Image: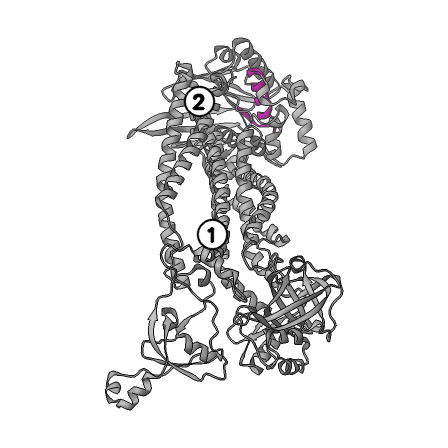
Amino acid sequence: MRGLGWSLKGLGRHRLRSALSVAGIAISAAMLLDMVMLSGGIEKSFAELLLARGYHIRLTPKGTLPFDTEATLSGAGRLIAAIRRDSSVEAAGAVLGTSLYSRRNDSLVTLFGYGIQPEAQALYTLESGHDLGPADTTGVLLSLPAAHLLGAGLGDSVTFMGRLDPQVVTAAVGRKLVVRGIVRWVYDYRGQPSVGTVLPAMQSLAGQRIGDHVSLLMVKVREDTAAALVAARLRTAFPQLEVNSVADLVRHFKQRLVYFRQLSYILASMSLVVTVLLIGTLLTITVNERLGEIATLRAIGISRATVVREILLEGAVLTLLGSSLGIVLGLLTARYLDSILTSFPGLPAAFSFFVPRGDSLTTAALVLLLTGVLAALYPAWLAARAPIAATLRTEAT
Amino acid sequence: MSRPVLLVRDLSKQYPMNHEAVHALRGVSLTVQPGEYVAIAGPSGSGKSTLLQLIGGIDTPSGGTVEILGTPLQQLSDRELTRLRLTRLGFIFQRFHLLPVLTAQENVELPMAEARVPRQQRRQRALDLLRYVGLADRAGHLATQLSGGEMQRVAIARALANRPALLLADEPTGELDAATGQEILDLFRRLNQDGTTLLVVTHDERLGAQAGRIIHMLDGRIQSDTSDIDSAATPRHHPATPR
Amino acid sequence: MITRARKLGGLLLLLVTAGARCLWAQVPAIAIERQLARQFDLSVGDTVSLGTQVDSLNLLVIVGAIYEPRPDPAEIAKRERHLRMHLPDLASLLGAADRVDRISIGLRPGISADSAAAILDRGAYGYRAFSSEAIASESSQTFLVVSRFHRAIAVITVVASAVFLLCIMLLKVEERRLDAAVMRFVGVRRRTIFGALLLEASLIAVLGSALGTVLAYLAGAATNAYYRRFFDTILTFSIITPGIVAFGVVLSLVLGALAGAFAAWRLVRTRPLVLWGRG
């Protein structure tokens, strides 16, 4: 090191000042990291959610998104058969979403019901017990909140009702089902009491059997790279349906959460501005304090380049120290901020706004480092252009 | 006669001040031969320090020329001037100007590090130089932990780091008490006896008496230039001087 | 899905026979959102076809009114378009006669909404009764989350600003250490120096607060202008109330004064010779 790190060693001369600067940079770095995670986290988390079981395409009634409305598709069986004829399709399944009711003691409880095709489903993972068979019309799967709400466990029988009629104070349909398994529904919000039966059973409960109505169809393609092409083919084949690949759904979702992305850009920019101001001000004042030293170094033959390098190095080291601390701080604050945002009503529990990824950490660190070095450019320029003789004269008075 | 170390011709310097020009130097000419010990004396404002700064290339003249070992400074770029200061000149300041965050040894190593001297070599030379100035036992101390005299000796060692052809000193005893100042003067005499060419700006009469040649300045001009013919003889090399 | 029909001119209306006029009177009227009208270049009097399936747009309706939707922050991001029609017309279109999603009840003055809802709930089967306040509270959960998020960001920003402020104050005050040393040498009291620095820090805080308030108003105006255009809505996104201004000014004054006081205290408690660099 040609300058022997004299500038770096100066950081230790004013410990409180250096510590405060590092703390300030750390907070800015934490904010920047959080905003980078937020801007990329939304789409990554949602895409992971959608691809959790490997289904690439969703088909819904025209103009709707999955479970956005109560609109349904008719002729699900016919549609599934047509879709499966495409050689790129590995699997296709239908889902019906509806409200269901049951009794706990004397109270009527409301549940969310999924009508599924267990052999082609992307909605749940089994936690205990066992899955439904494709023709198991007497079995039911419960989420843990549903099990608590109903006071039911594996093997218990529960009566479910659909289509309550307030005028006659009775349900049009009721069915007793046996709890086969406890599952985690991928798209459920925290505490959602959901139950699942095979599709025909749920259609009966919801009065959607005639017409073979479902809420959506899901398609898994053989090759991930073929998803967009298959989606295009399905759009042509079924113009009366809304066909969305995972990329399309992510785009829609991003559109709905555009505010958070834009907020993340604004706050990230502010963090960088604060970092620039902090490092720039600190180093400018430090350089002004050390002009005498710098003039001496120039007088004894230390080149401008060495002086500039030392100042830039000081800026880089401050930023590096602050960033390291900031990454830890950022991960902690991200958890806190995520806990706030994931309490949005109706948001899937598995969804996360702040997703720590290697590339976001690296991006944030590199951007900060570059910012720190750029912020040091002005003070470095000040140091390099200080007139030697005039400065030495000023220092002597 | 060998090529002069320093050749100054008709050097002048003006500073603008309140719409007037202050003439700090007016047509100064002088020559310094290898091995000379030259003192520049005069009252405050006579232009001594300005002359030293122009010779050292850390200020630019309004007129005239300066040659160091035959190289005209006016023809050099800033980078070349810096290089010249690093390799051909040594600077000693009145207020020492050591870097407080570095140790005595590191302060001496600094010019060698800039000149890309290998680490082991520069560390050894730094220790040798500190031994020469009598501070080998203080090598590991920070500059702020040294006394005034010790700091000035470290500054002298630093100035000698890259074996300069000419040592420039601006009031080297100005901040020191009489006893400490005498130590510095003794060191200067030893340096000169060992062959170092010295050009020293001073108010100190003792240094004036010690130098082989005294140049008196007044109002930016050389009033008188005495030279001791015996002192201008071929420099003697002493094995104690780290070369 | 709707299809577009050509608008009837005034002359055409005059030529319509009485029988034709009777026929028009039977066409259901709808009211559409301003954004929907703009998107499909519709105006009052235009006819459109409605249906629940893409291949069965069988119901002909006439645009009877264009309205500005109530700005609902929960809806703007969805970019959905709405229209209003008479309940029997919609029920007929959906094939769900006498079915509704909710029934709104107006109470006589003096009747408590919560108690009325409780009474209705006792006999309820297949529905639940809520007071409007309860619904508002439930549906505003989204905004409570957003508010909490904003508050968290604000806290982080204030902490960062405080650290930044303290650092800058320390730097600026330390720049004056030689001046402070000389003042102490000539006999100026610590209290005087402390007071001068504190006053300076407070003045800077006042100026900074004023500038910050102006910047906040400008940023708020820019935010509203941008997002209103982006979402095509009249919703107000940023509101700066006198309370918010007061809070911001007081906070920055307090932080600025505290930072200045700390920096000044560090300076005046240091011995003059140390400040001078000789201690």
Residue B235 location in percent, x, y? Answer: 60, 20
Q: Are marks 2 and 1 in contact (CB under 8 Å)?
A: no
| Residue in the picture at 44% in, 59% down | C73
Q: Is B5 in front, or is A310?
A: A310
Give the number of the disc on residue C178: 2
Give the number of the disc on residue A266: 1
Mark 2 to mark 1: distance in Å? 41 Å
Residue A14 found in image quarter: top right
Closer to the eye: label 2 or 1: 1
- What's drawn in magenta, residue-wise? B147-167
Q: Amino acid at mark 1?
A: Ile
Q: Label 1: state its secondary structure.
A: helix
| Residue in the picture at 62% in, 25% down | B103
Q: Amino acid at mark 2?
A: Leu
Q: Chain of mark 1?
A: A
Horizontally, residue C18 falls left or right of residue A242, namely left
A238 relative to B237, above or below: below
**What is the image's colouring?**
one colour
Residue C15 location in percent, x, y? Answer: 24, 89
Residue B215 found in image quarter: top left
Q: Is A18 in front, or is A148?
A: A148
Residue A385: say if magenta: no
